[in-house]
Amino acid sequence: MTEYDRHGPVVVGIDGSRAAIHAAQWAIDEAVDRNVPLCLVHVTRIAISTKSFADEYRIDKEYAETSLREAASAVKATGKPVKLDCIIRHGLAGKALIGESRNASLVCVGSEGVGRLAGAFFGSTATEVAKRAHCLVAVVRRPESGSDTRQLWIAVAVNEPGESDAAIDCAMQEGRMRQLPVLAVGTWQEDMGEHPYDKLDHRVEALRERYRDVRIYPVTTPADLGRFLKNSDEPVSIAVVRRADIGHVIHTRPSPGRGERTLLIVRD
């Protein structure tokens, strides 16, 4: 079984936005479950020693401290027993978070923000972090609307054994921690023959034997995971994807009235 690293801190990019604060709150359970610190990181511009930039640097520093203080307060307000660290880095947001990922087990970023992290996971910062991070990456999106009371799900593609074991293990760990059932999505092509359901059923039975404390339900689709998520009306809270499949899912949108899906991106 392929295990992903769970020993480093959980890092959250903080930029002063509500989305970043939500990402920090979402990440608390990840840190508690791993028994590691929750590290809040704000990235400011590179310091310039020229006198004319002194005021700008001071403003950036004050903004960073305020952003971290507000995020830390939101984390502490949950009352959950997590060790909290706050760090200010200088430079480009993407490169700084990639640097932090070398020793992290997970890097989390809100899907919307302000400043240089605004819309990060819809542009160059998204691509850079998602493709080059040395650990799991979570794109934490806005919370679900309280109007939808249906069962939430975790979704992961399940194909041939060995092809996506790290993503499957990640999905099962999330299901166990968050007490959510897992949709095992069988994505098949024409060359799989006329009985893809049988192959998926056998795969899921093996997974149920391995992860006995997780509820796993099979579903098939003649498409990729991204199109399944786009067309499905099921309230998927977290989609776990391999790095190679980022392009299929990162821009998917849920139905109106529900929160967007958090993406957990697993290294290949």
Image (tube, helix red, strand yellow):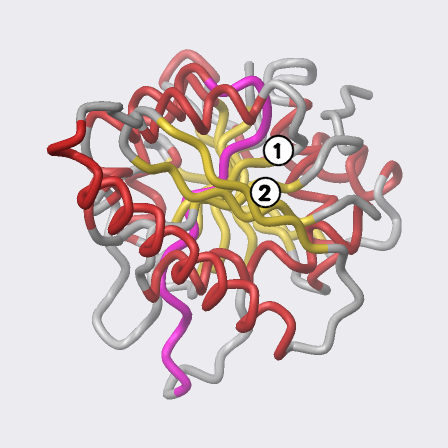
Q: Which of the two residues, 110 or 181, is positioned nearer the viewer here? A: 110
Secondary structure category for the residue under label 2: strand
Q: Which of the two residues, 54 or 186, is positioned nearer the viewer here? A: 54
Other-residue count near label 2 (Cα within 10 Å), few / some / many at <14 / 14–19 / ≥20: many
Answer left or right for 255 relative to 142: left
Secondary structure category for the residue under label 1: helix
Q: Is residue 138 magenta?
A: yes
Give the residue number, with chain letter if any, for mark 2.
184
Residue 200's disc number: 1
Answer left or right for 168 relative to 154: right
Rendered view: 66 above or below 266: below
What quarter of the picture does the C terminus occupy? top right
Q: Which of the two residues, 168 or 23, is positioned nearer the viewer here? A: 23
Image quarter for residue 267?
top right
**C-alpha gap between disc 2 and disc 1:** 8 Å
Residue furthest front as drawn: 51
Rendered view: 227 above or below 113: above
Q: Please, what is the three-letter code of the amino acid marked with disc 2? A: Ala
Magenta region, residue range: 133-146
